[in-house]
Image: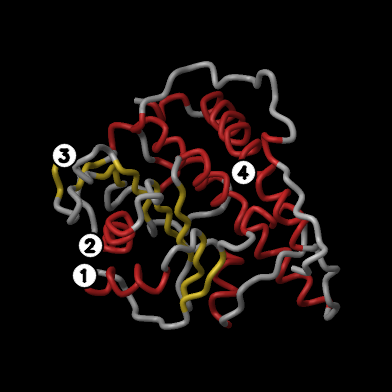
Amino acid sequence: MSTTETLRQGGTAVWAPRITPPIGVELDDRQALACAFRILAHGGFSENIAGHITQIKDDSGAMWINPWGLWWEEVSASDLCVVDRDGALVDGRWDVTPAFHIHTELHRRRPDARVVVHNHPYYVTVLAAVGVLPEIVHQTGSMFDGDLAFVHEYTGEVDDAELGRDLAERIGDKSVVILASHGIIVTAPTIQEATYKSASIDRFCRLAYDVMLLGRDPLAISEGIRHGMKRSLLERGSDVFWAGAVRALLRREPEVLD
């Protein structure tokens, strides 16, 4: 950014709503996580049986996690399992795959990463296949400004702690990371922000992909504008997106809370 460019402030410092439409029910952490699975599945984020979302449960480092064998679109609150900080099953009626190592090491190293989302959305994996980190070509993509990274080394299934530690080191402090020939990892401090960013990432990648196909350079969005847009999208948009997505889900599938 040039020294003369002004950073747009954006976010709730500029404007905050007096009131927003509520979900209509109080969700506990387990119910909220079950809703996140179905919201993202219906939005095309998940690839059939693949992927996990983990959320820190308490100060011990224990995590809520989805079981092996259920597709994201059919997960209900009672299906979720609890694993300890090393991935050992503590509670739950189903089993959990060793792919949890993608998550445990990030949670261990990143206090800000209370929620970790991993799967293989289609347009994300198109770019992952050719090693391309998408450009910000539309204002909504500003929510990812400064947080995007690409891990170029493909190591196959991350099924042990050593591979998990290596991946966590490569990810560093980035919150949205595309994995070569694999998929994506999104981290966030809340389930609301994690779901909003995850629900937005594949369209972001599709827009970048389609602009590449046009063979034209995208118009530049200055860093100063991206800064303000990012704050507005995340600070004002995360909770509103979440509430609307949950309301829509509960109208169709109220059993998700069971």
Dots 1, 4 in contact, CB < 8 A: no
Quadrant of image for the C terminus: top left
Q: Which residue is mark 2?
A: 98
Tell me if mark 4 has few (under 14), some (14-19) or many (20+) residues whose alpha carbon lies within 10 angstroms of its own.
many
Q: Earlier in the sequence, mark 1 or mark 2?
A: 2
Tell me how far mark 1 sits from mark 4, CA to CA: 33 Å
Which mark sits nearer the N-terminus, 1 or 3?
A: 3
Whether residue 191 sits left or right of residue 68 in the image: it is right
Circle nearer the N terminus (3, 4): 3
Residue 37 position (above or below residue 174): above
**On the rendered structure, is 139 left or right of 81?**
right
Q: Earlier in the sequence, mark 1 or mark 4?
A: 1
Q: Quick one: quadrant of the N terminus? A: bottom right
Q: In x, y percent, where is residue 242?
A: 56, 34
Label 1: which residue? Answer: 160
Query: In the picture, residue 221 is in which quadrant?
Result: bottom right
Q: Nearer the viewer, residue 18 or 23?
A: 18
Q: How far is mark 3 from mark 4, CA to CA?
A: 33 Å
Label 3 SS: strand
Callout 3 amino acid: Asp
Name the residue beneath numbered marker 4. 234
Which color scheme did the rendering employ for the protein?
A: secondary structure
Q: Nearer the viewer, mark 4 or mark 2?
A: 4
CA separation in Å, label 1 and label 2:
7 Å
Q: Residues within 10 Å of mark 3 (few under 14, many from 20)?
A: few
- Can you tell which mark lies on residue 82? none
Q: Which residue is mark 3?
A: 91
- Residue in the image at 73% along x and 31% along y: 15
**Disc 2 secondary structure class:** helix
